[in-house]
Image (cartoon, rainbow, N blue to C red):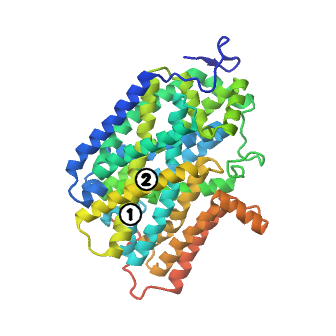
Amino acid sequence: MLKFRPETGIEGDQTISLYDTNFTLLDWSIVVCYLLSSIVIGLWANRYVGNLSDYLVAGRKLRLRLALATMTGTELGLVTVMYMAELGFTQQYASLYLAFLEAGAVLLIGLTGFVVYRLRQSSIMTIPEYYEQRYSQSVRVVGATVMVVSGVLNMGLFLKAGSQFLTAVSGLQDEMYLKLIMTGLLLLVLFYTVLGGMVSVVITDLIQFLILGTGMVIVTGVVFWSIGWDGLSAIVTEQNGYYDPFHPENNSGNGNPIGWLQIVQMAIVIGSAALLWPTSAARTLSCQSAEVAQKLYSLSSISFLARRALPVFWGIGTFAFFASQPELFQEFHQAVETNASITSLSAMPLFLAKVVPTGLLGLVTAGMIAAFMSTHDSYLLCWSGVITQDIIAPIAGPMSQRSRILTTRISIFVIGAMLLTWGLWYEVSSDLWGYLAVTGAVYLSGAIPTVVGGLYWKRGSRAGALAAILGGLSGLLAMGPCVVLINKLFATSLNGTHLTLLTFVFSSVAYIVFSLLIPDRHAETSPNVSVNPA
């Protein structure tokens, strides 16, 4: 184990190459054993899938502790670890604001039961199902389509992020390894998700929660032991590492500093996602009761804080590691410019590969792959379920349980192929979190007024819902290439933050205006305004 000090960096005269790693055959064996166990789980869980309710929401039988574990396992994905560590590496302590925003939003939802209590009471399986229950079938189909477009785009770079972790931590340099690992991991997740549905997802999420939790404790301990409190403070703030989040010359990754406008944007995106992001909602709708769903959010606030805060410290430790060795830092920057498989996302796993000892490194890597798989299986099942339940079934008419499960399984494979293609060729023009926030807003900006207005405003209409949902598609303009084109055509200086906020405002205003201008002929029964009607 290498020991670092803020004054001298590495003890002794040791020199380290960028691709040096403690990852050995023992670590590969640990990882392979874990992957094989996932295959066994998929085969076993397939025996317990009898109908679509079993397949999509595990028969609505999740108790609080299991729901908490699977919620954490899903939302604490490797992509979260990677992008938060990337932010910690590039922005240091400033990036912690995201952790506190999310924990506060989740806790507030848990304490009030806002939206989630009533959604669980409605006995729906997906958010678009509520669209039809409250508005109409056309709203359901349109809303589901926009949701899938947003979700698949949002998920498009998960695969590349996970593969970058494994290639960097194991010392693999060839870009071809990145592509092969992306393909292999995807095929494995497809296998057990297609077979067992939500049953296998819940079981694997529980196991992955335990493995990932162990891995995160190990990594956090190693980072603090290697760098030390003094190192985390002195190196980051004194060796050209201080990041002023409000200085105009410091970019947040999408061309603007972390000013108040971006904090507002992230508060809206994170709060909306905590309420209605489909994979989180799937856990809510799988709970035994509305009371369990509400408690799930209150308790999840702790794990949601940890899932963002701990990787930030890993990123800060990574910066401290590189900052103490200028030659290695220079080698890293050169690799970013010349090697397509190395980006700022690779910094954290390159650091762990050098400070975590053999054996433990295999366990940590298995934990990170567990995080990768727990997110992918839930997302694949969620989007495929929406395609079957909310797009194909309403259009095609009555479908048997067997046909619905088959359609869902086919959709999983189709989405998987799209993810592989998108992950191989799309290059992110900003930090990964910026990309996720923008693509997520395409769905969330329309879903928030549609669901909240439907639950708490009796005058919300079908026309308003359609206007809000379709208005969310304007969020696509906030993606990097579109921003560049808009600024070029109209000689503006807009960025992703501006366009994302405009999308939320536009969709909300559209919902209100069209609901008032084109009311439903038969007014919906007004729901009680009290959040917890029980």
Residue at (64% x, 26% y) in the render: 321
Q: What element carries label 2?
A: helix
Q: In the rendered image, is residue 272 in sight?
A: yes
Residue at (53% x, 43% y) in the render: 161
Q: In this view, does 477 lie above or below 296?
A: below
Q: Quadrant of the N terminus?
A: top right
Q: Is residue 82 above or below residue 111?
A: above
Q: Earlier in the sequence, mark 2 or mark 1?
A: 1
* Position of residue 491 measured from the top left corner of the image (x, y, whole percent): 79, 66
Discs 2/1, front = 2
Residue 406 lies in quadrant: bottom left
> What residue is shown with label 2?
416
The amino acid beneath tag 1 is Val
Q: In the rendered image, is residue 67 in sight?
A: no
Q: Depth check: give the residue in front, 111 or 351.
A: 351
Does the CB distance between marks 2 and 1 fall below 8 Å? no
Which dot marks residue 386? 1
Residue at (38% x, 77% y) in the render: 137
* Residue farthest toward the bottom in the current orientation of the protein: 521
Which dot marks residue 526? none
Q: Depth check: give the residue in front, 103 or 141.
A: 141
Question: CA–CA distance between discs 2 and 1?
Answer: 15 Å
- Left/right placement of residue 228 relative to residue 372 reads right
